Amino acid sequence: MRLLAVIPARYASTRFPGKPLALLGGKPVIQRVWERVAAIEGLTKAVVATDDERIIDAVRAFGGNAMMTSDKHRSGTDRCGEVVRRLAEQGESFDVVINVQGDEPFVKAEQLMQLASCFDNKEVCIATLRTRILSDEELLSKNNVKVVCDKNGSALYFSRQPIPLVRGCEEREWLSKCEYYKHVGIYAFRCDTLLHLTQLQPSALECAESLEQLRWLENGYRIAVRTTSVANIGIDTPDDLAAAERYMIAHGEK
């Protein structure tokens, strides 16, 4: 299987401009993501996809591979699609592409390999991860996307609200009555599926929840979901960066 990893990275983040270049433990955040992704066993190629020359320069300075992409993309998925199309024009083809956001410096290579292994099943076209929710704070936060699956491990729905609702119980009792899972926003796609997804128009559920994966479900795509014990720490704000620094110190990460 020819495996491509794409790391979308924007400079103009509303909550944290320039965050891919912010230093975390003495290295740019984007470098830490690159180093984790480059450790995937069997990886054919990795590309940082950005719309800013400063990120291009930084990636090339630490020996990474970067591609300038359009500044019109609505999502990292669309940016990944551009990379796949342009590489195809250059004669490079891949079977599966993994989308790892450029603000996920603690992503584990084993998580990405877990995703890639989903495609040993020829029926899988899209795969993603989830992790168990263990606190009421996590469960009730609208920043944490929750996912429910069928018995075969395919996503039924994603929501910013706690799902399912446990009828007749106070919210503080829900975790004792039902298992809840948080979506880990790392995706893998068959390349032809990814290109089809980038042609779809935004859907009603997607617009309501502000979750692009609902567009795929509404259009009949199945999403395979696998469980990971790793709760990734994304960086959206300067406060998140400070928390990431503390996490690195506490866990002895370099």
Image (cartoon, grey):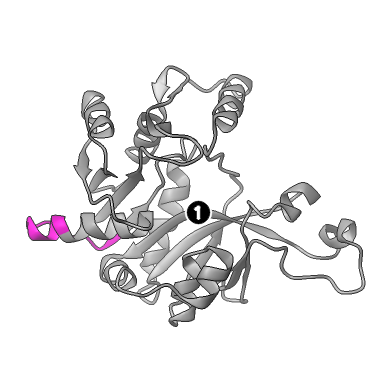
Up the image or down, 18 lies above or below 234; here it is above
Classify mark 1: residues with Cα within 10 Å, few (<14), some (14-19) or many (20+). Answer: some
Residue furthest top in the image: 26
Residue furthest left in the image: 90
Identify the residue position indicated by label 1 in the image.
Answer: 185
Which amino acid, by three-letter code, is at mark 1? Answer: Gly
Percent coordinates x, y for residue 121 in the rendering: 39, 71
Query: Looking at the image, which residue is at 64% across and 61% down?
Result: 160
Q: Indicate yes or no whether the magenta region holds residue 92.
A: yes
Query: Looking at the image, which residue is at 91% across and 63% down?
Result: 170
Q: Quadrant of residue 163?
A: bottom right
Residue furthest bottom in the image: 220
Up the image or down, 205 lies above or below 12; here it is below
Percent coordinates x, y for residue 69 in the rendering: 22, 49
Percent coordinates x, y for residue 254 in the rendering: 48, 20
Judge left or right: residue 92 versus residue 55: left
In which quadrant of the rendered image does the N terminus lie?
Answer: bottom left
Q: Which residues are magenta?
A: 86-96
